[in-house]
Amino acid sequence: MTSRPVIFGAIVLLALLHGALFWPGIMTWDAIRQYGQALSGQYDDWHPPAMNWLWRQLGLFGAGPAPMLVLQLALYWGGTALWMQAAWARGRRGATGAIALLALSPIVLVLVGTILKDSLFAGTLLLASGLLAARPGDRAARIVAALLLVAAATLRFNAVPACLPLLLLAVPAAWRRTVPRLGATALLAAIPLVLALPLANAALHAKRSGVELSLVIYDLGGIGAFAKTDVFPRTSVANPVAVNEDCYSPISWDRYAWWGAAPCAIGFTTLDAPLKAGHGPYGWWAAAVAAHPLAYAEHRLAHFDRNTRFLVHDADLPGLSPQSDPNPWGFTVAPNGWRSALQHAADATLTTPPGWPICWLALGLGLLVLRPRLGDGDPAVALAWSAVLYGFSYLPLSVASEVRYHFWTMTAVGIAAALLLSQRATWQLPRWRLAAAAAPLLIVVAAGVIARA
């Protein structure tokens, strides 16, 4: 029996067991809001309208989260199977087993079982990259992969750094043979990725929700908190410096939003109109950053520290959703001892280095020290670039600290490491280079452990 039927047979069995544990899928507040728009056919741009529209089409197969769960399972396990097949075809038996083991990460299994744009995004990238790795000479596979990557770019506003290195694999090798050609090809390939989200929103007539204000408000709050001054537009709130100091958290912007038990007196509701006056929200943002660059840097680094679970106390950070939030349709996941055990394992993993996104980013940087040349067309190198660029995009762009944002980074770095570290040529590199590659991971693990101690 060849490897392909064995791999795909095992994957189908795992996908079925995975789906049974989480059926019909965990729905968080985000998914509840998205499903409501899927039912109505009226979209806004707070969450990706393309996903809401897709969910509406999946309604042909059934109501609720189940069809989206099936899609997430198909993307994730289909992509995993393709990467395992690619490793096996290259004679990397150890890498094949490592990819299978990584796919069973409790954190990832819970995320796939939860209806999230991040899970859909990561699954789409996993399938697209798997096609490119398993079918490198197949033109049809390259076209399908390219279309999947453009589709994925409609799901996250910071999708371009993740999608671009993978899309470069889909072009003819001659287009990336030299650095100038690679640069020109990258610029051309970035165009459809940049346009995907705004064009999808326009095609679906998505209403403007002001979602972009969340980042502006959070940055203004962070600058004000670290600079001990008021950089917000004038409001009727007395003593805005003290109010902001009480509201600001390096973990997330949630106190500035309208939800929650104690929304800040200075927040989305009170700042919507003032921010849009004058030079607009980005004018306010630019002026604050220019006036207080060190405070902005402190805020961004403090948030990135929490976002990547680096020098933190794990109990202060949000965990994974164990159950659906209350929703008008009564969708819930039935109690299950196996799923509860998996959830406990995921929660426990979050307190260890494999659950810290900063460790995967550090490992990804180390892999790029070993093999930095994207133009060579090595799928593992493209994965590493995709994961690292996407992970670091949250340094300037994030407003919350949840491990789901790093789903793709953790998965992609794991597969890239399995492939690159299983190559004999990797271990024949100069010792100084191997040491430089290992240094980032060793440093962040040691620092993270000390901080938690």
Image (cartoon, rainbow, N blue to C red):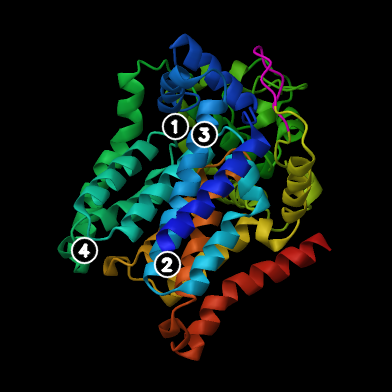
User: Which residue matches tag 2?
Assistant: 87
Q: Nearer the viewer, residue 217 or 375?
A: 375
Q: Earlier in the sequence, mark 1 or mark 3?
A: 3
Q: Is residue 445 left or right of residue 397?
A: right
> Which mark is nearer the camera, 1 or 3?
3
In the figure, 363 relative to 168: above or below?
below
> Could you say whether the residue bearing mark 3 is in a helix, strand or loop?
helix
The CA span between labels 4 and 3 is: 36 Å
Residue 182 in the image: above or below residue 404 = below
Label 3 belongs to which residue? 70
Residue 376, image quadrant: bottom left
Q: Is residue 190 visible?
A: yes
Q: CA distance from mark 1 to mark 4?
A: 36 Å
Q: Which residue is mark 4?
A: 176
Looking at marks 2 and 1 on the same chain, the residue that comes earlier in the sequence is marked by 2
Residues shaded magenta: 323-332
Q: What secondary structure characterizes most of the magenta part?
A: loop
Q: Kindly identify the residue that appears in the image at 48 percent across and 29 percent down.
A: 212
